[in-house]
Amino acid sequence: MIVVENLHRHFGSFRAVDGASLHIKAGSITGLIGPNGAGKTTLFNVIAGRLPPTSGRVLMSGEDITGLPPHELFHKGVLRTFQIAHEFGSMTVRENLMMVPEGQTGETLWNTWFRRGAVAAEERRIRERADEVLEFLTIRHLADERAANISGGQKKLLELGRTMMVDAKIVFLDEVGAGVNRTLLNTIGDAIVRLNQERGYTFCVIEHDMDFIARLCNPVICMAEGRVLAEGTVDEVKNDERVIEAYLGT
Ligand code: ADP
């Protein structure tokens, strides 16, 4: 689904991504691991249109999507999770989900003034979808809570939920398990597996928790110093001498 070809992203003379090439297969949950500073987040940001590459290409199903802005990638079903921004904390959990769909009928002033019936119907539809998402994630009971008041783990679930408000094809998750307790981490893992199996989402997951990676991901890609070092099953990668050396070197 995604092919990254010889990607570079330099910051001045520093090569954060230094010739990375990799494939993400449609239907996979691909894990991206590597020591701190390996360039994983920078690679995500380039693929997801947040940072232009210095050179190299990103293809999606054969189409060149290098450097497309996030909203265009969004329309192609390429999503990256983001922390719930501070300013959305005062909105409820449900409202945070309802913000996501683009092209809502209520977007233009014309529609708001002249087609109130249509706007109300659209809002009902989006609200229903938000409630389905909350049900799926087992946090329906939090629908009317202010987003600022829910726990860190529940916020991670909400971030994942935002990708479910549209028909995503591939979702990039950056440390979705960071600081999350084991129970919620399992809930997040279950949701990822169900989205993968039932809705055909492809995932690429950056995560430090190796148990989480081992449970969910195949294949696993290990990066170090801006390049791909090894790829395979979690056991193959964990036992690869270059990988062990890269982790020991940090
Ligand atoms: P990882 O996610 O694998 O920990 P990152 O992609 O976050 O790695 O970072 C790779 C390297 O690039 C780090 O050494 C980091 O300091 C550097 N880096 C990341 N973003 C910037 C930036 N905007 N300006 C300068 N250096 C950066």
Image: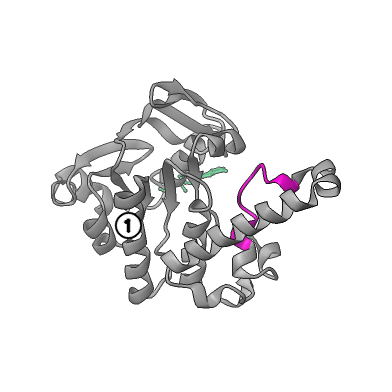
- Whether residue 210 sits left or right of residue 169 in the image: it is left
The residue located at (54%, 76%) in the rendering is: 142
How has the structure been colored for display? one colour
* Residue 149 spot, x, y in % from top left: 60, 78
Give the structural element (helix, strand or loop) at label 1: helix
Question: Does the beta carbon of the residue at mark 1 sit less than 8 Å from ligand 1?
Answer: no
Q: Is residue 236 magenta?
A: no
Q: Quadrant of the N terminus?
A: top left
* Residue 241 spot, x, y in % from top left: 15, 45
The quarter holding residue 83 reads bottom right
Front position in the image: 40 or 12: 40
The residue located at (75%, 48%) in the rendering is: 106
Front position in the image: 26 or 43: 26
Q: Can you identify the residue that label 1 sits on?
A: 194
Residue 183 in view (yes/no): yes
The residue located at (67%, 63%) in the rendering is: 88
Extent of the magenta region? 96-106
Q: Is residue 135 above or below residue 14?
A: below
- Whether residue 19 sits left or right of residue 82 in the image: it is left
The quarter holding residue 73 reads top right
Q: Is residue 103 magenta?
A: yes
Front position in the image: 174 or 155: 155
Residue 35 in view (yes/no): no
How many numbered marks are there?
A: 1
The residue located at (66%, 68%) in the rendering is: 89
- Whether residue 189 sits left or right of residue 123 in the image: it is left
Q: Is residue 209 above or below residue 246?
A: below
Q: Is residue 13 above or below residue 109?
A: above
- Tag 1: residue type? Arg
